[in-house]
Image: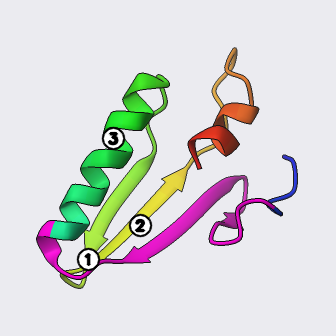
Protein backbone atom coordinates (compact mmCIF):
# COMPACT_ATOMS: atom_id res chain seq x y z
CA UNK A 1 0.00 0.00 0.00
CA UNK A 2 1.41 3.48 -0.87
CA UNK A 3 2.57 5.82 1.93
CA UNK A 4 0.03 8.03 3.71
CA UNK A 5 1.98 11.27 3.30
CA UNK A 6 -1.06 13.07 1.84
CA UNK A 7 -3.40 11.65 4.51
CA UNK A 8 -1.90 12.83 7.82
CA UNK A 9 -5.00 12.05 9.93
CA UNK A 10 -5.19 8.43 8.79
CA UNK A 11 -3.13 5.58 10.22
CA UNK A 12 -2.40 2.06 9.14
CA UNK A 13 -4.02 -0.68 11.18
CA UNK A 14 -2.55 -3.86 9.74
CA UNK A 15 -3.69 -3.90 6.11
CA UNK A 16 -6.46 -1.36 6.80
CA UNK A 17 -6.62 2.43 7.05
CA UNK A 18 -8.25 3.94 10.15
CA UNK A 19 -9.28 7.43 11.21
CA UNK A 20 -11.11 8.59 14.32
CA UNK A 21 -12.82 11.99 14.35
CA UNK A 22 -14.29 13.74 17.37
CA UNK A 23 -17.59 15.45 16.55
CA UNK A 24 -19.39 18.17 18.50
CA UNK A 25 -22.35 15.92 19.27
CA UNK A 26 -23.77 12.46 18.70
CA UNK A 27 -26.06 13.69 15.86
CA UNK A 28 -23.02 15.33 14.21
CA UNK A 29 -21.11 12.03 14.46
CA UNK A 30 -24.02 10.20 12.81
CA UNK A 31 -24.18 12.82 10.05
CA UNK A 32 -20.46 12.27 9.39
CA UNK A 33 -20.95 8.50 9.16
CA UNK A 34 -23.83 9.14 6.73
CA UNK A 35 -21.59 11.30 4.49
CA UNK A 36 -18.90 8.61 4.52
CA UNK A 37 -21.54 6.01 3.59
CA UNK A 38 -22.81 8.07 0.63
CA UNK A 39 -19.30 8.55 -0.77
CA UNK A 40 -18.32 4.93 -0.16
CA UNK A 41 -21.50 3.61 -1.81
CA UNK A 42 -20.84 5.69 -4.93
CA UNK A 43 -17.41 3.99 -5.11
CA UNK A 44 -18.83 0.51 -4.40
CA UNK A 45 -16.72 0.50 -1.24
CA UNK A 46 -18.10 -0.50 2.16
CA UNK A 47 -15.89 0.54 5.09
CA UNK A 48 -16.53 -0.35 8.72
CA UNK A 49 -17.81 2.70 10.59
CA UNK A 50 -18.85 3.16 14.18
CA UNK A 51 -19.73 5.82 16.72
CA UNK A 52 -19.04 5.75 20.43
CA UNK A 53 -18.69 8.00 23.45
CA UNK A 54 -21.53 10.10 22.08
CA UNK A 55 -19.39 12.03 19.62
CA UNK A 56 -16.63 9.86 18.19
CA UNK A 57 -16.71 8.47 14.67
CA UNK A 58 -14.31 5.77 13.53
CA UNK A 59 -13.90 4.64 9.95
CA UNK A 60 -11.86 1.61 8.94
CA UNK A 61 -11.19 0.95 5.28
CA UNK A 62 -10.42 -2.72 4.76
CA UNK A 63 -8.00 -4.22 2.23
CA UNK A 64 -9.23 -4.29 -1.36
CA UNK A 65 -11.33 -7.16 -2.57
CA UNK A 66 -10.23 -9.15 -5.58
CA UNK A 67 -10.69 -7.14 -8.73
CA UNK A 68 -10.77 -3.75 -7.00
CA UNK A 69 -7.98 -1.23 -7.48
CA UNK A 70 -5.98 -0.89 -4.23
CA UNK A 71 -5.80 2.85 -4.90
CA UNK A 72 -9.54 3.07 -4.19
CA UNK A 73 -8.79 2.70 -0.46
CA UNK A 74 -6.65 5.83 -0.57
CA UNK A 75 -9.16 7.62 -2.81
CA UNK A 76 -11.95 7.00 -0.29
CA UNK A 77 -9.73 8.16 2.61
Q: Position of residue 3 (x, y in %)?
A: 87, 57
- Residue 37's label in the rendered image is 3
What is the span of residues highlighted in magenta in the rendered image? 6-27
Mark 2 neighbour class, 10 Å CA radius: few under 14, some 14 to 19, many 20 or more: some
Q: Secondary structure at mark 3?
A: helix
Residue reaching furthest to the top: 67
Q: Position of residue 74 (x, y in %)?
A: 69, 44
Q: Name the N-terminal-most of marks 1 and 2.
A: 1
Task: Please identify the quarter of the rendering in which residue 7 is found.
Answer: bottom right
Mark 3 neighbour class, 10 Å CA radius: few under 14, some 14 to 19, many 20 or more: some
Question: Residue, x 42% and y 74% (percent of image)?
Answer: 21
- Residue 52's label in the rendered image is 1
Above/below status of 30 relative to 11 = above
Mark 1 neighbour class, 10 Å CA radius: few under 14, some 14 to 19, many 20 or more: few
Q: Name the N-terminal-most of marks 3 and 1.
A: 3
Q: Name the N-terminal-most of marks 3 and 2.
A: 3
Q: Are marks 1 and 2 in contact (CB under 8 Å)?
A: yes
Amino acid sequence: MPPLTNLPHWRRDGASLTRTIESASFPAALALVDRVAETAESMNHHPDTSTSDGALSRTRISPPLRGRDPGSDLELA
